Image: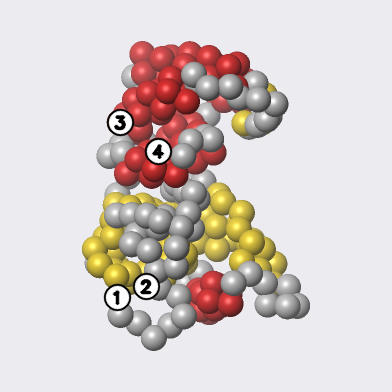
Amino acid sequence: MTRLSIFPLPGAILFPGLQLPLHIFEPRYRSLVGDALVRDRKIALIQPQRSIDGAPLYTVGCVGRIGEVEAMEDGRYNLILEGEARFKLIRELDVATAFRQVEGELIEDDENDVLSAIERAGFEQEARRFASAQGYSVDWDSVERLDDFSLINGVSQIAPFDPASKQALLEAENIHARCELLIQLMQFFGRGDGGEEIMTLQ
């Protein structure tokens, strides 16, 4: 079991091996970052089940390490959080700190796991359909060079799905289950009108 200081952020998902830029301005989370910087630079990102203070948490989040950080004169931070490992929430702790803390169990993901050729081809085909329907600009040459772990987790992190769907992707047992769910979500959300929003995937 591991004691984790958490940043409960609705709609934000972090996966191992990926990065997430954050702007920290609330006093309690400035305290969280300051505490992490003098210890191990680690904070855990997890979604609350509702967008209210003190809301119950989902059961799976991701531990991140603070990489680049800019400390501003007024106490705010701009930082890059680098995903290290998913974790399963065991229980929330009763603490005196302004920020919440939990006990969690780290999840060991196999970064060398690979999709079958059929899985990869099926995913890329559906991704091309989805991008075209939504009007997204995608560098497909760069996509094809990504390893399976980076591709599936990367799309899961940035895809324009609702928070519950993104949480389901984070909780998927492995990249095979995550790939299958991604395809289902792209088929479902791809039915809508993407409007004029443009997203660039690199």
Q: Looking at the picture, does residue 117 appear above or below residue 100?
A: above
Depth check, mark 4 against mark 1: the one in front is 4
Is residue 75 shown to the viewer in this render? Answer: yes
Mark 4–mark 1 contact, CB under 8 Å? no
Gap in Å between the C-alphas at discs 4 and 1? 27 Å
| Disc 2 residue crowd, few under 14, some 14–19, many 20+, Cα 10 Å | many
Give the residue at mark 4.
Answer: 165
Left or right, residue 79 beside residue 43: right
Gap in Å between the C-alphas at discs 2 and 1? 6 Å
Q: Helix, strand or loop at disc 1?
A: loop
Residue at (61%, 66%) from the top-left corner?
24
Mark 4 vs 1, N-terminal side:
1
Gap in Å between the C-alphas at discs 2 and 4? 25 Å
Left or right, residue 31 beside residue 5: right
Mark 2 vs 4, N-terminal side:
2
Give the residue at mark 2.
Answer: 101
Mark 2 vs 1, N-terminal side:
1
Residue at (41%, 27%) from the top-left corner?
185
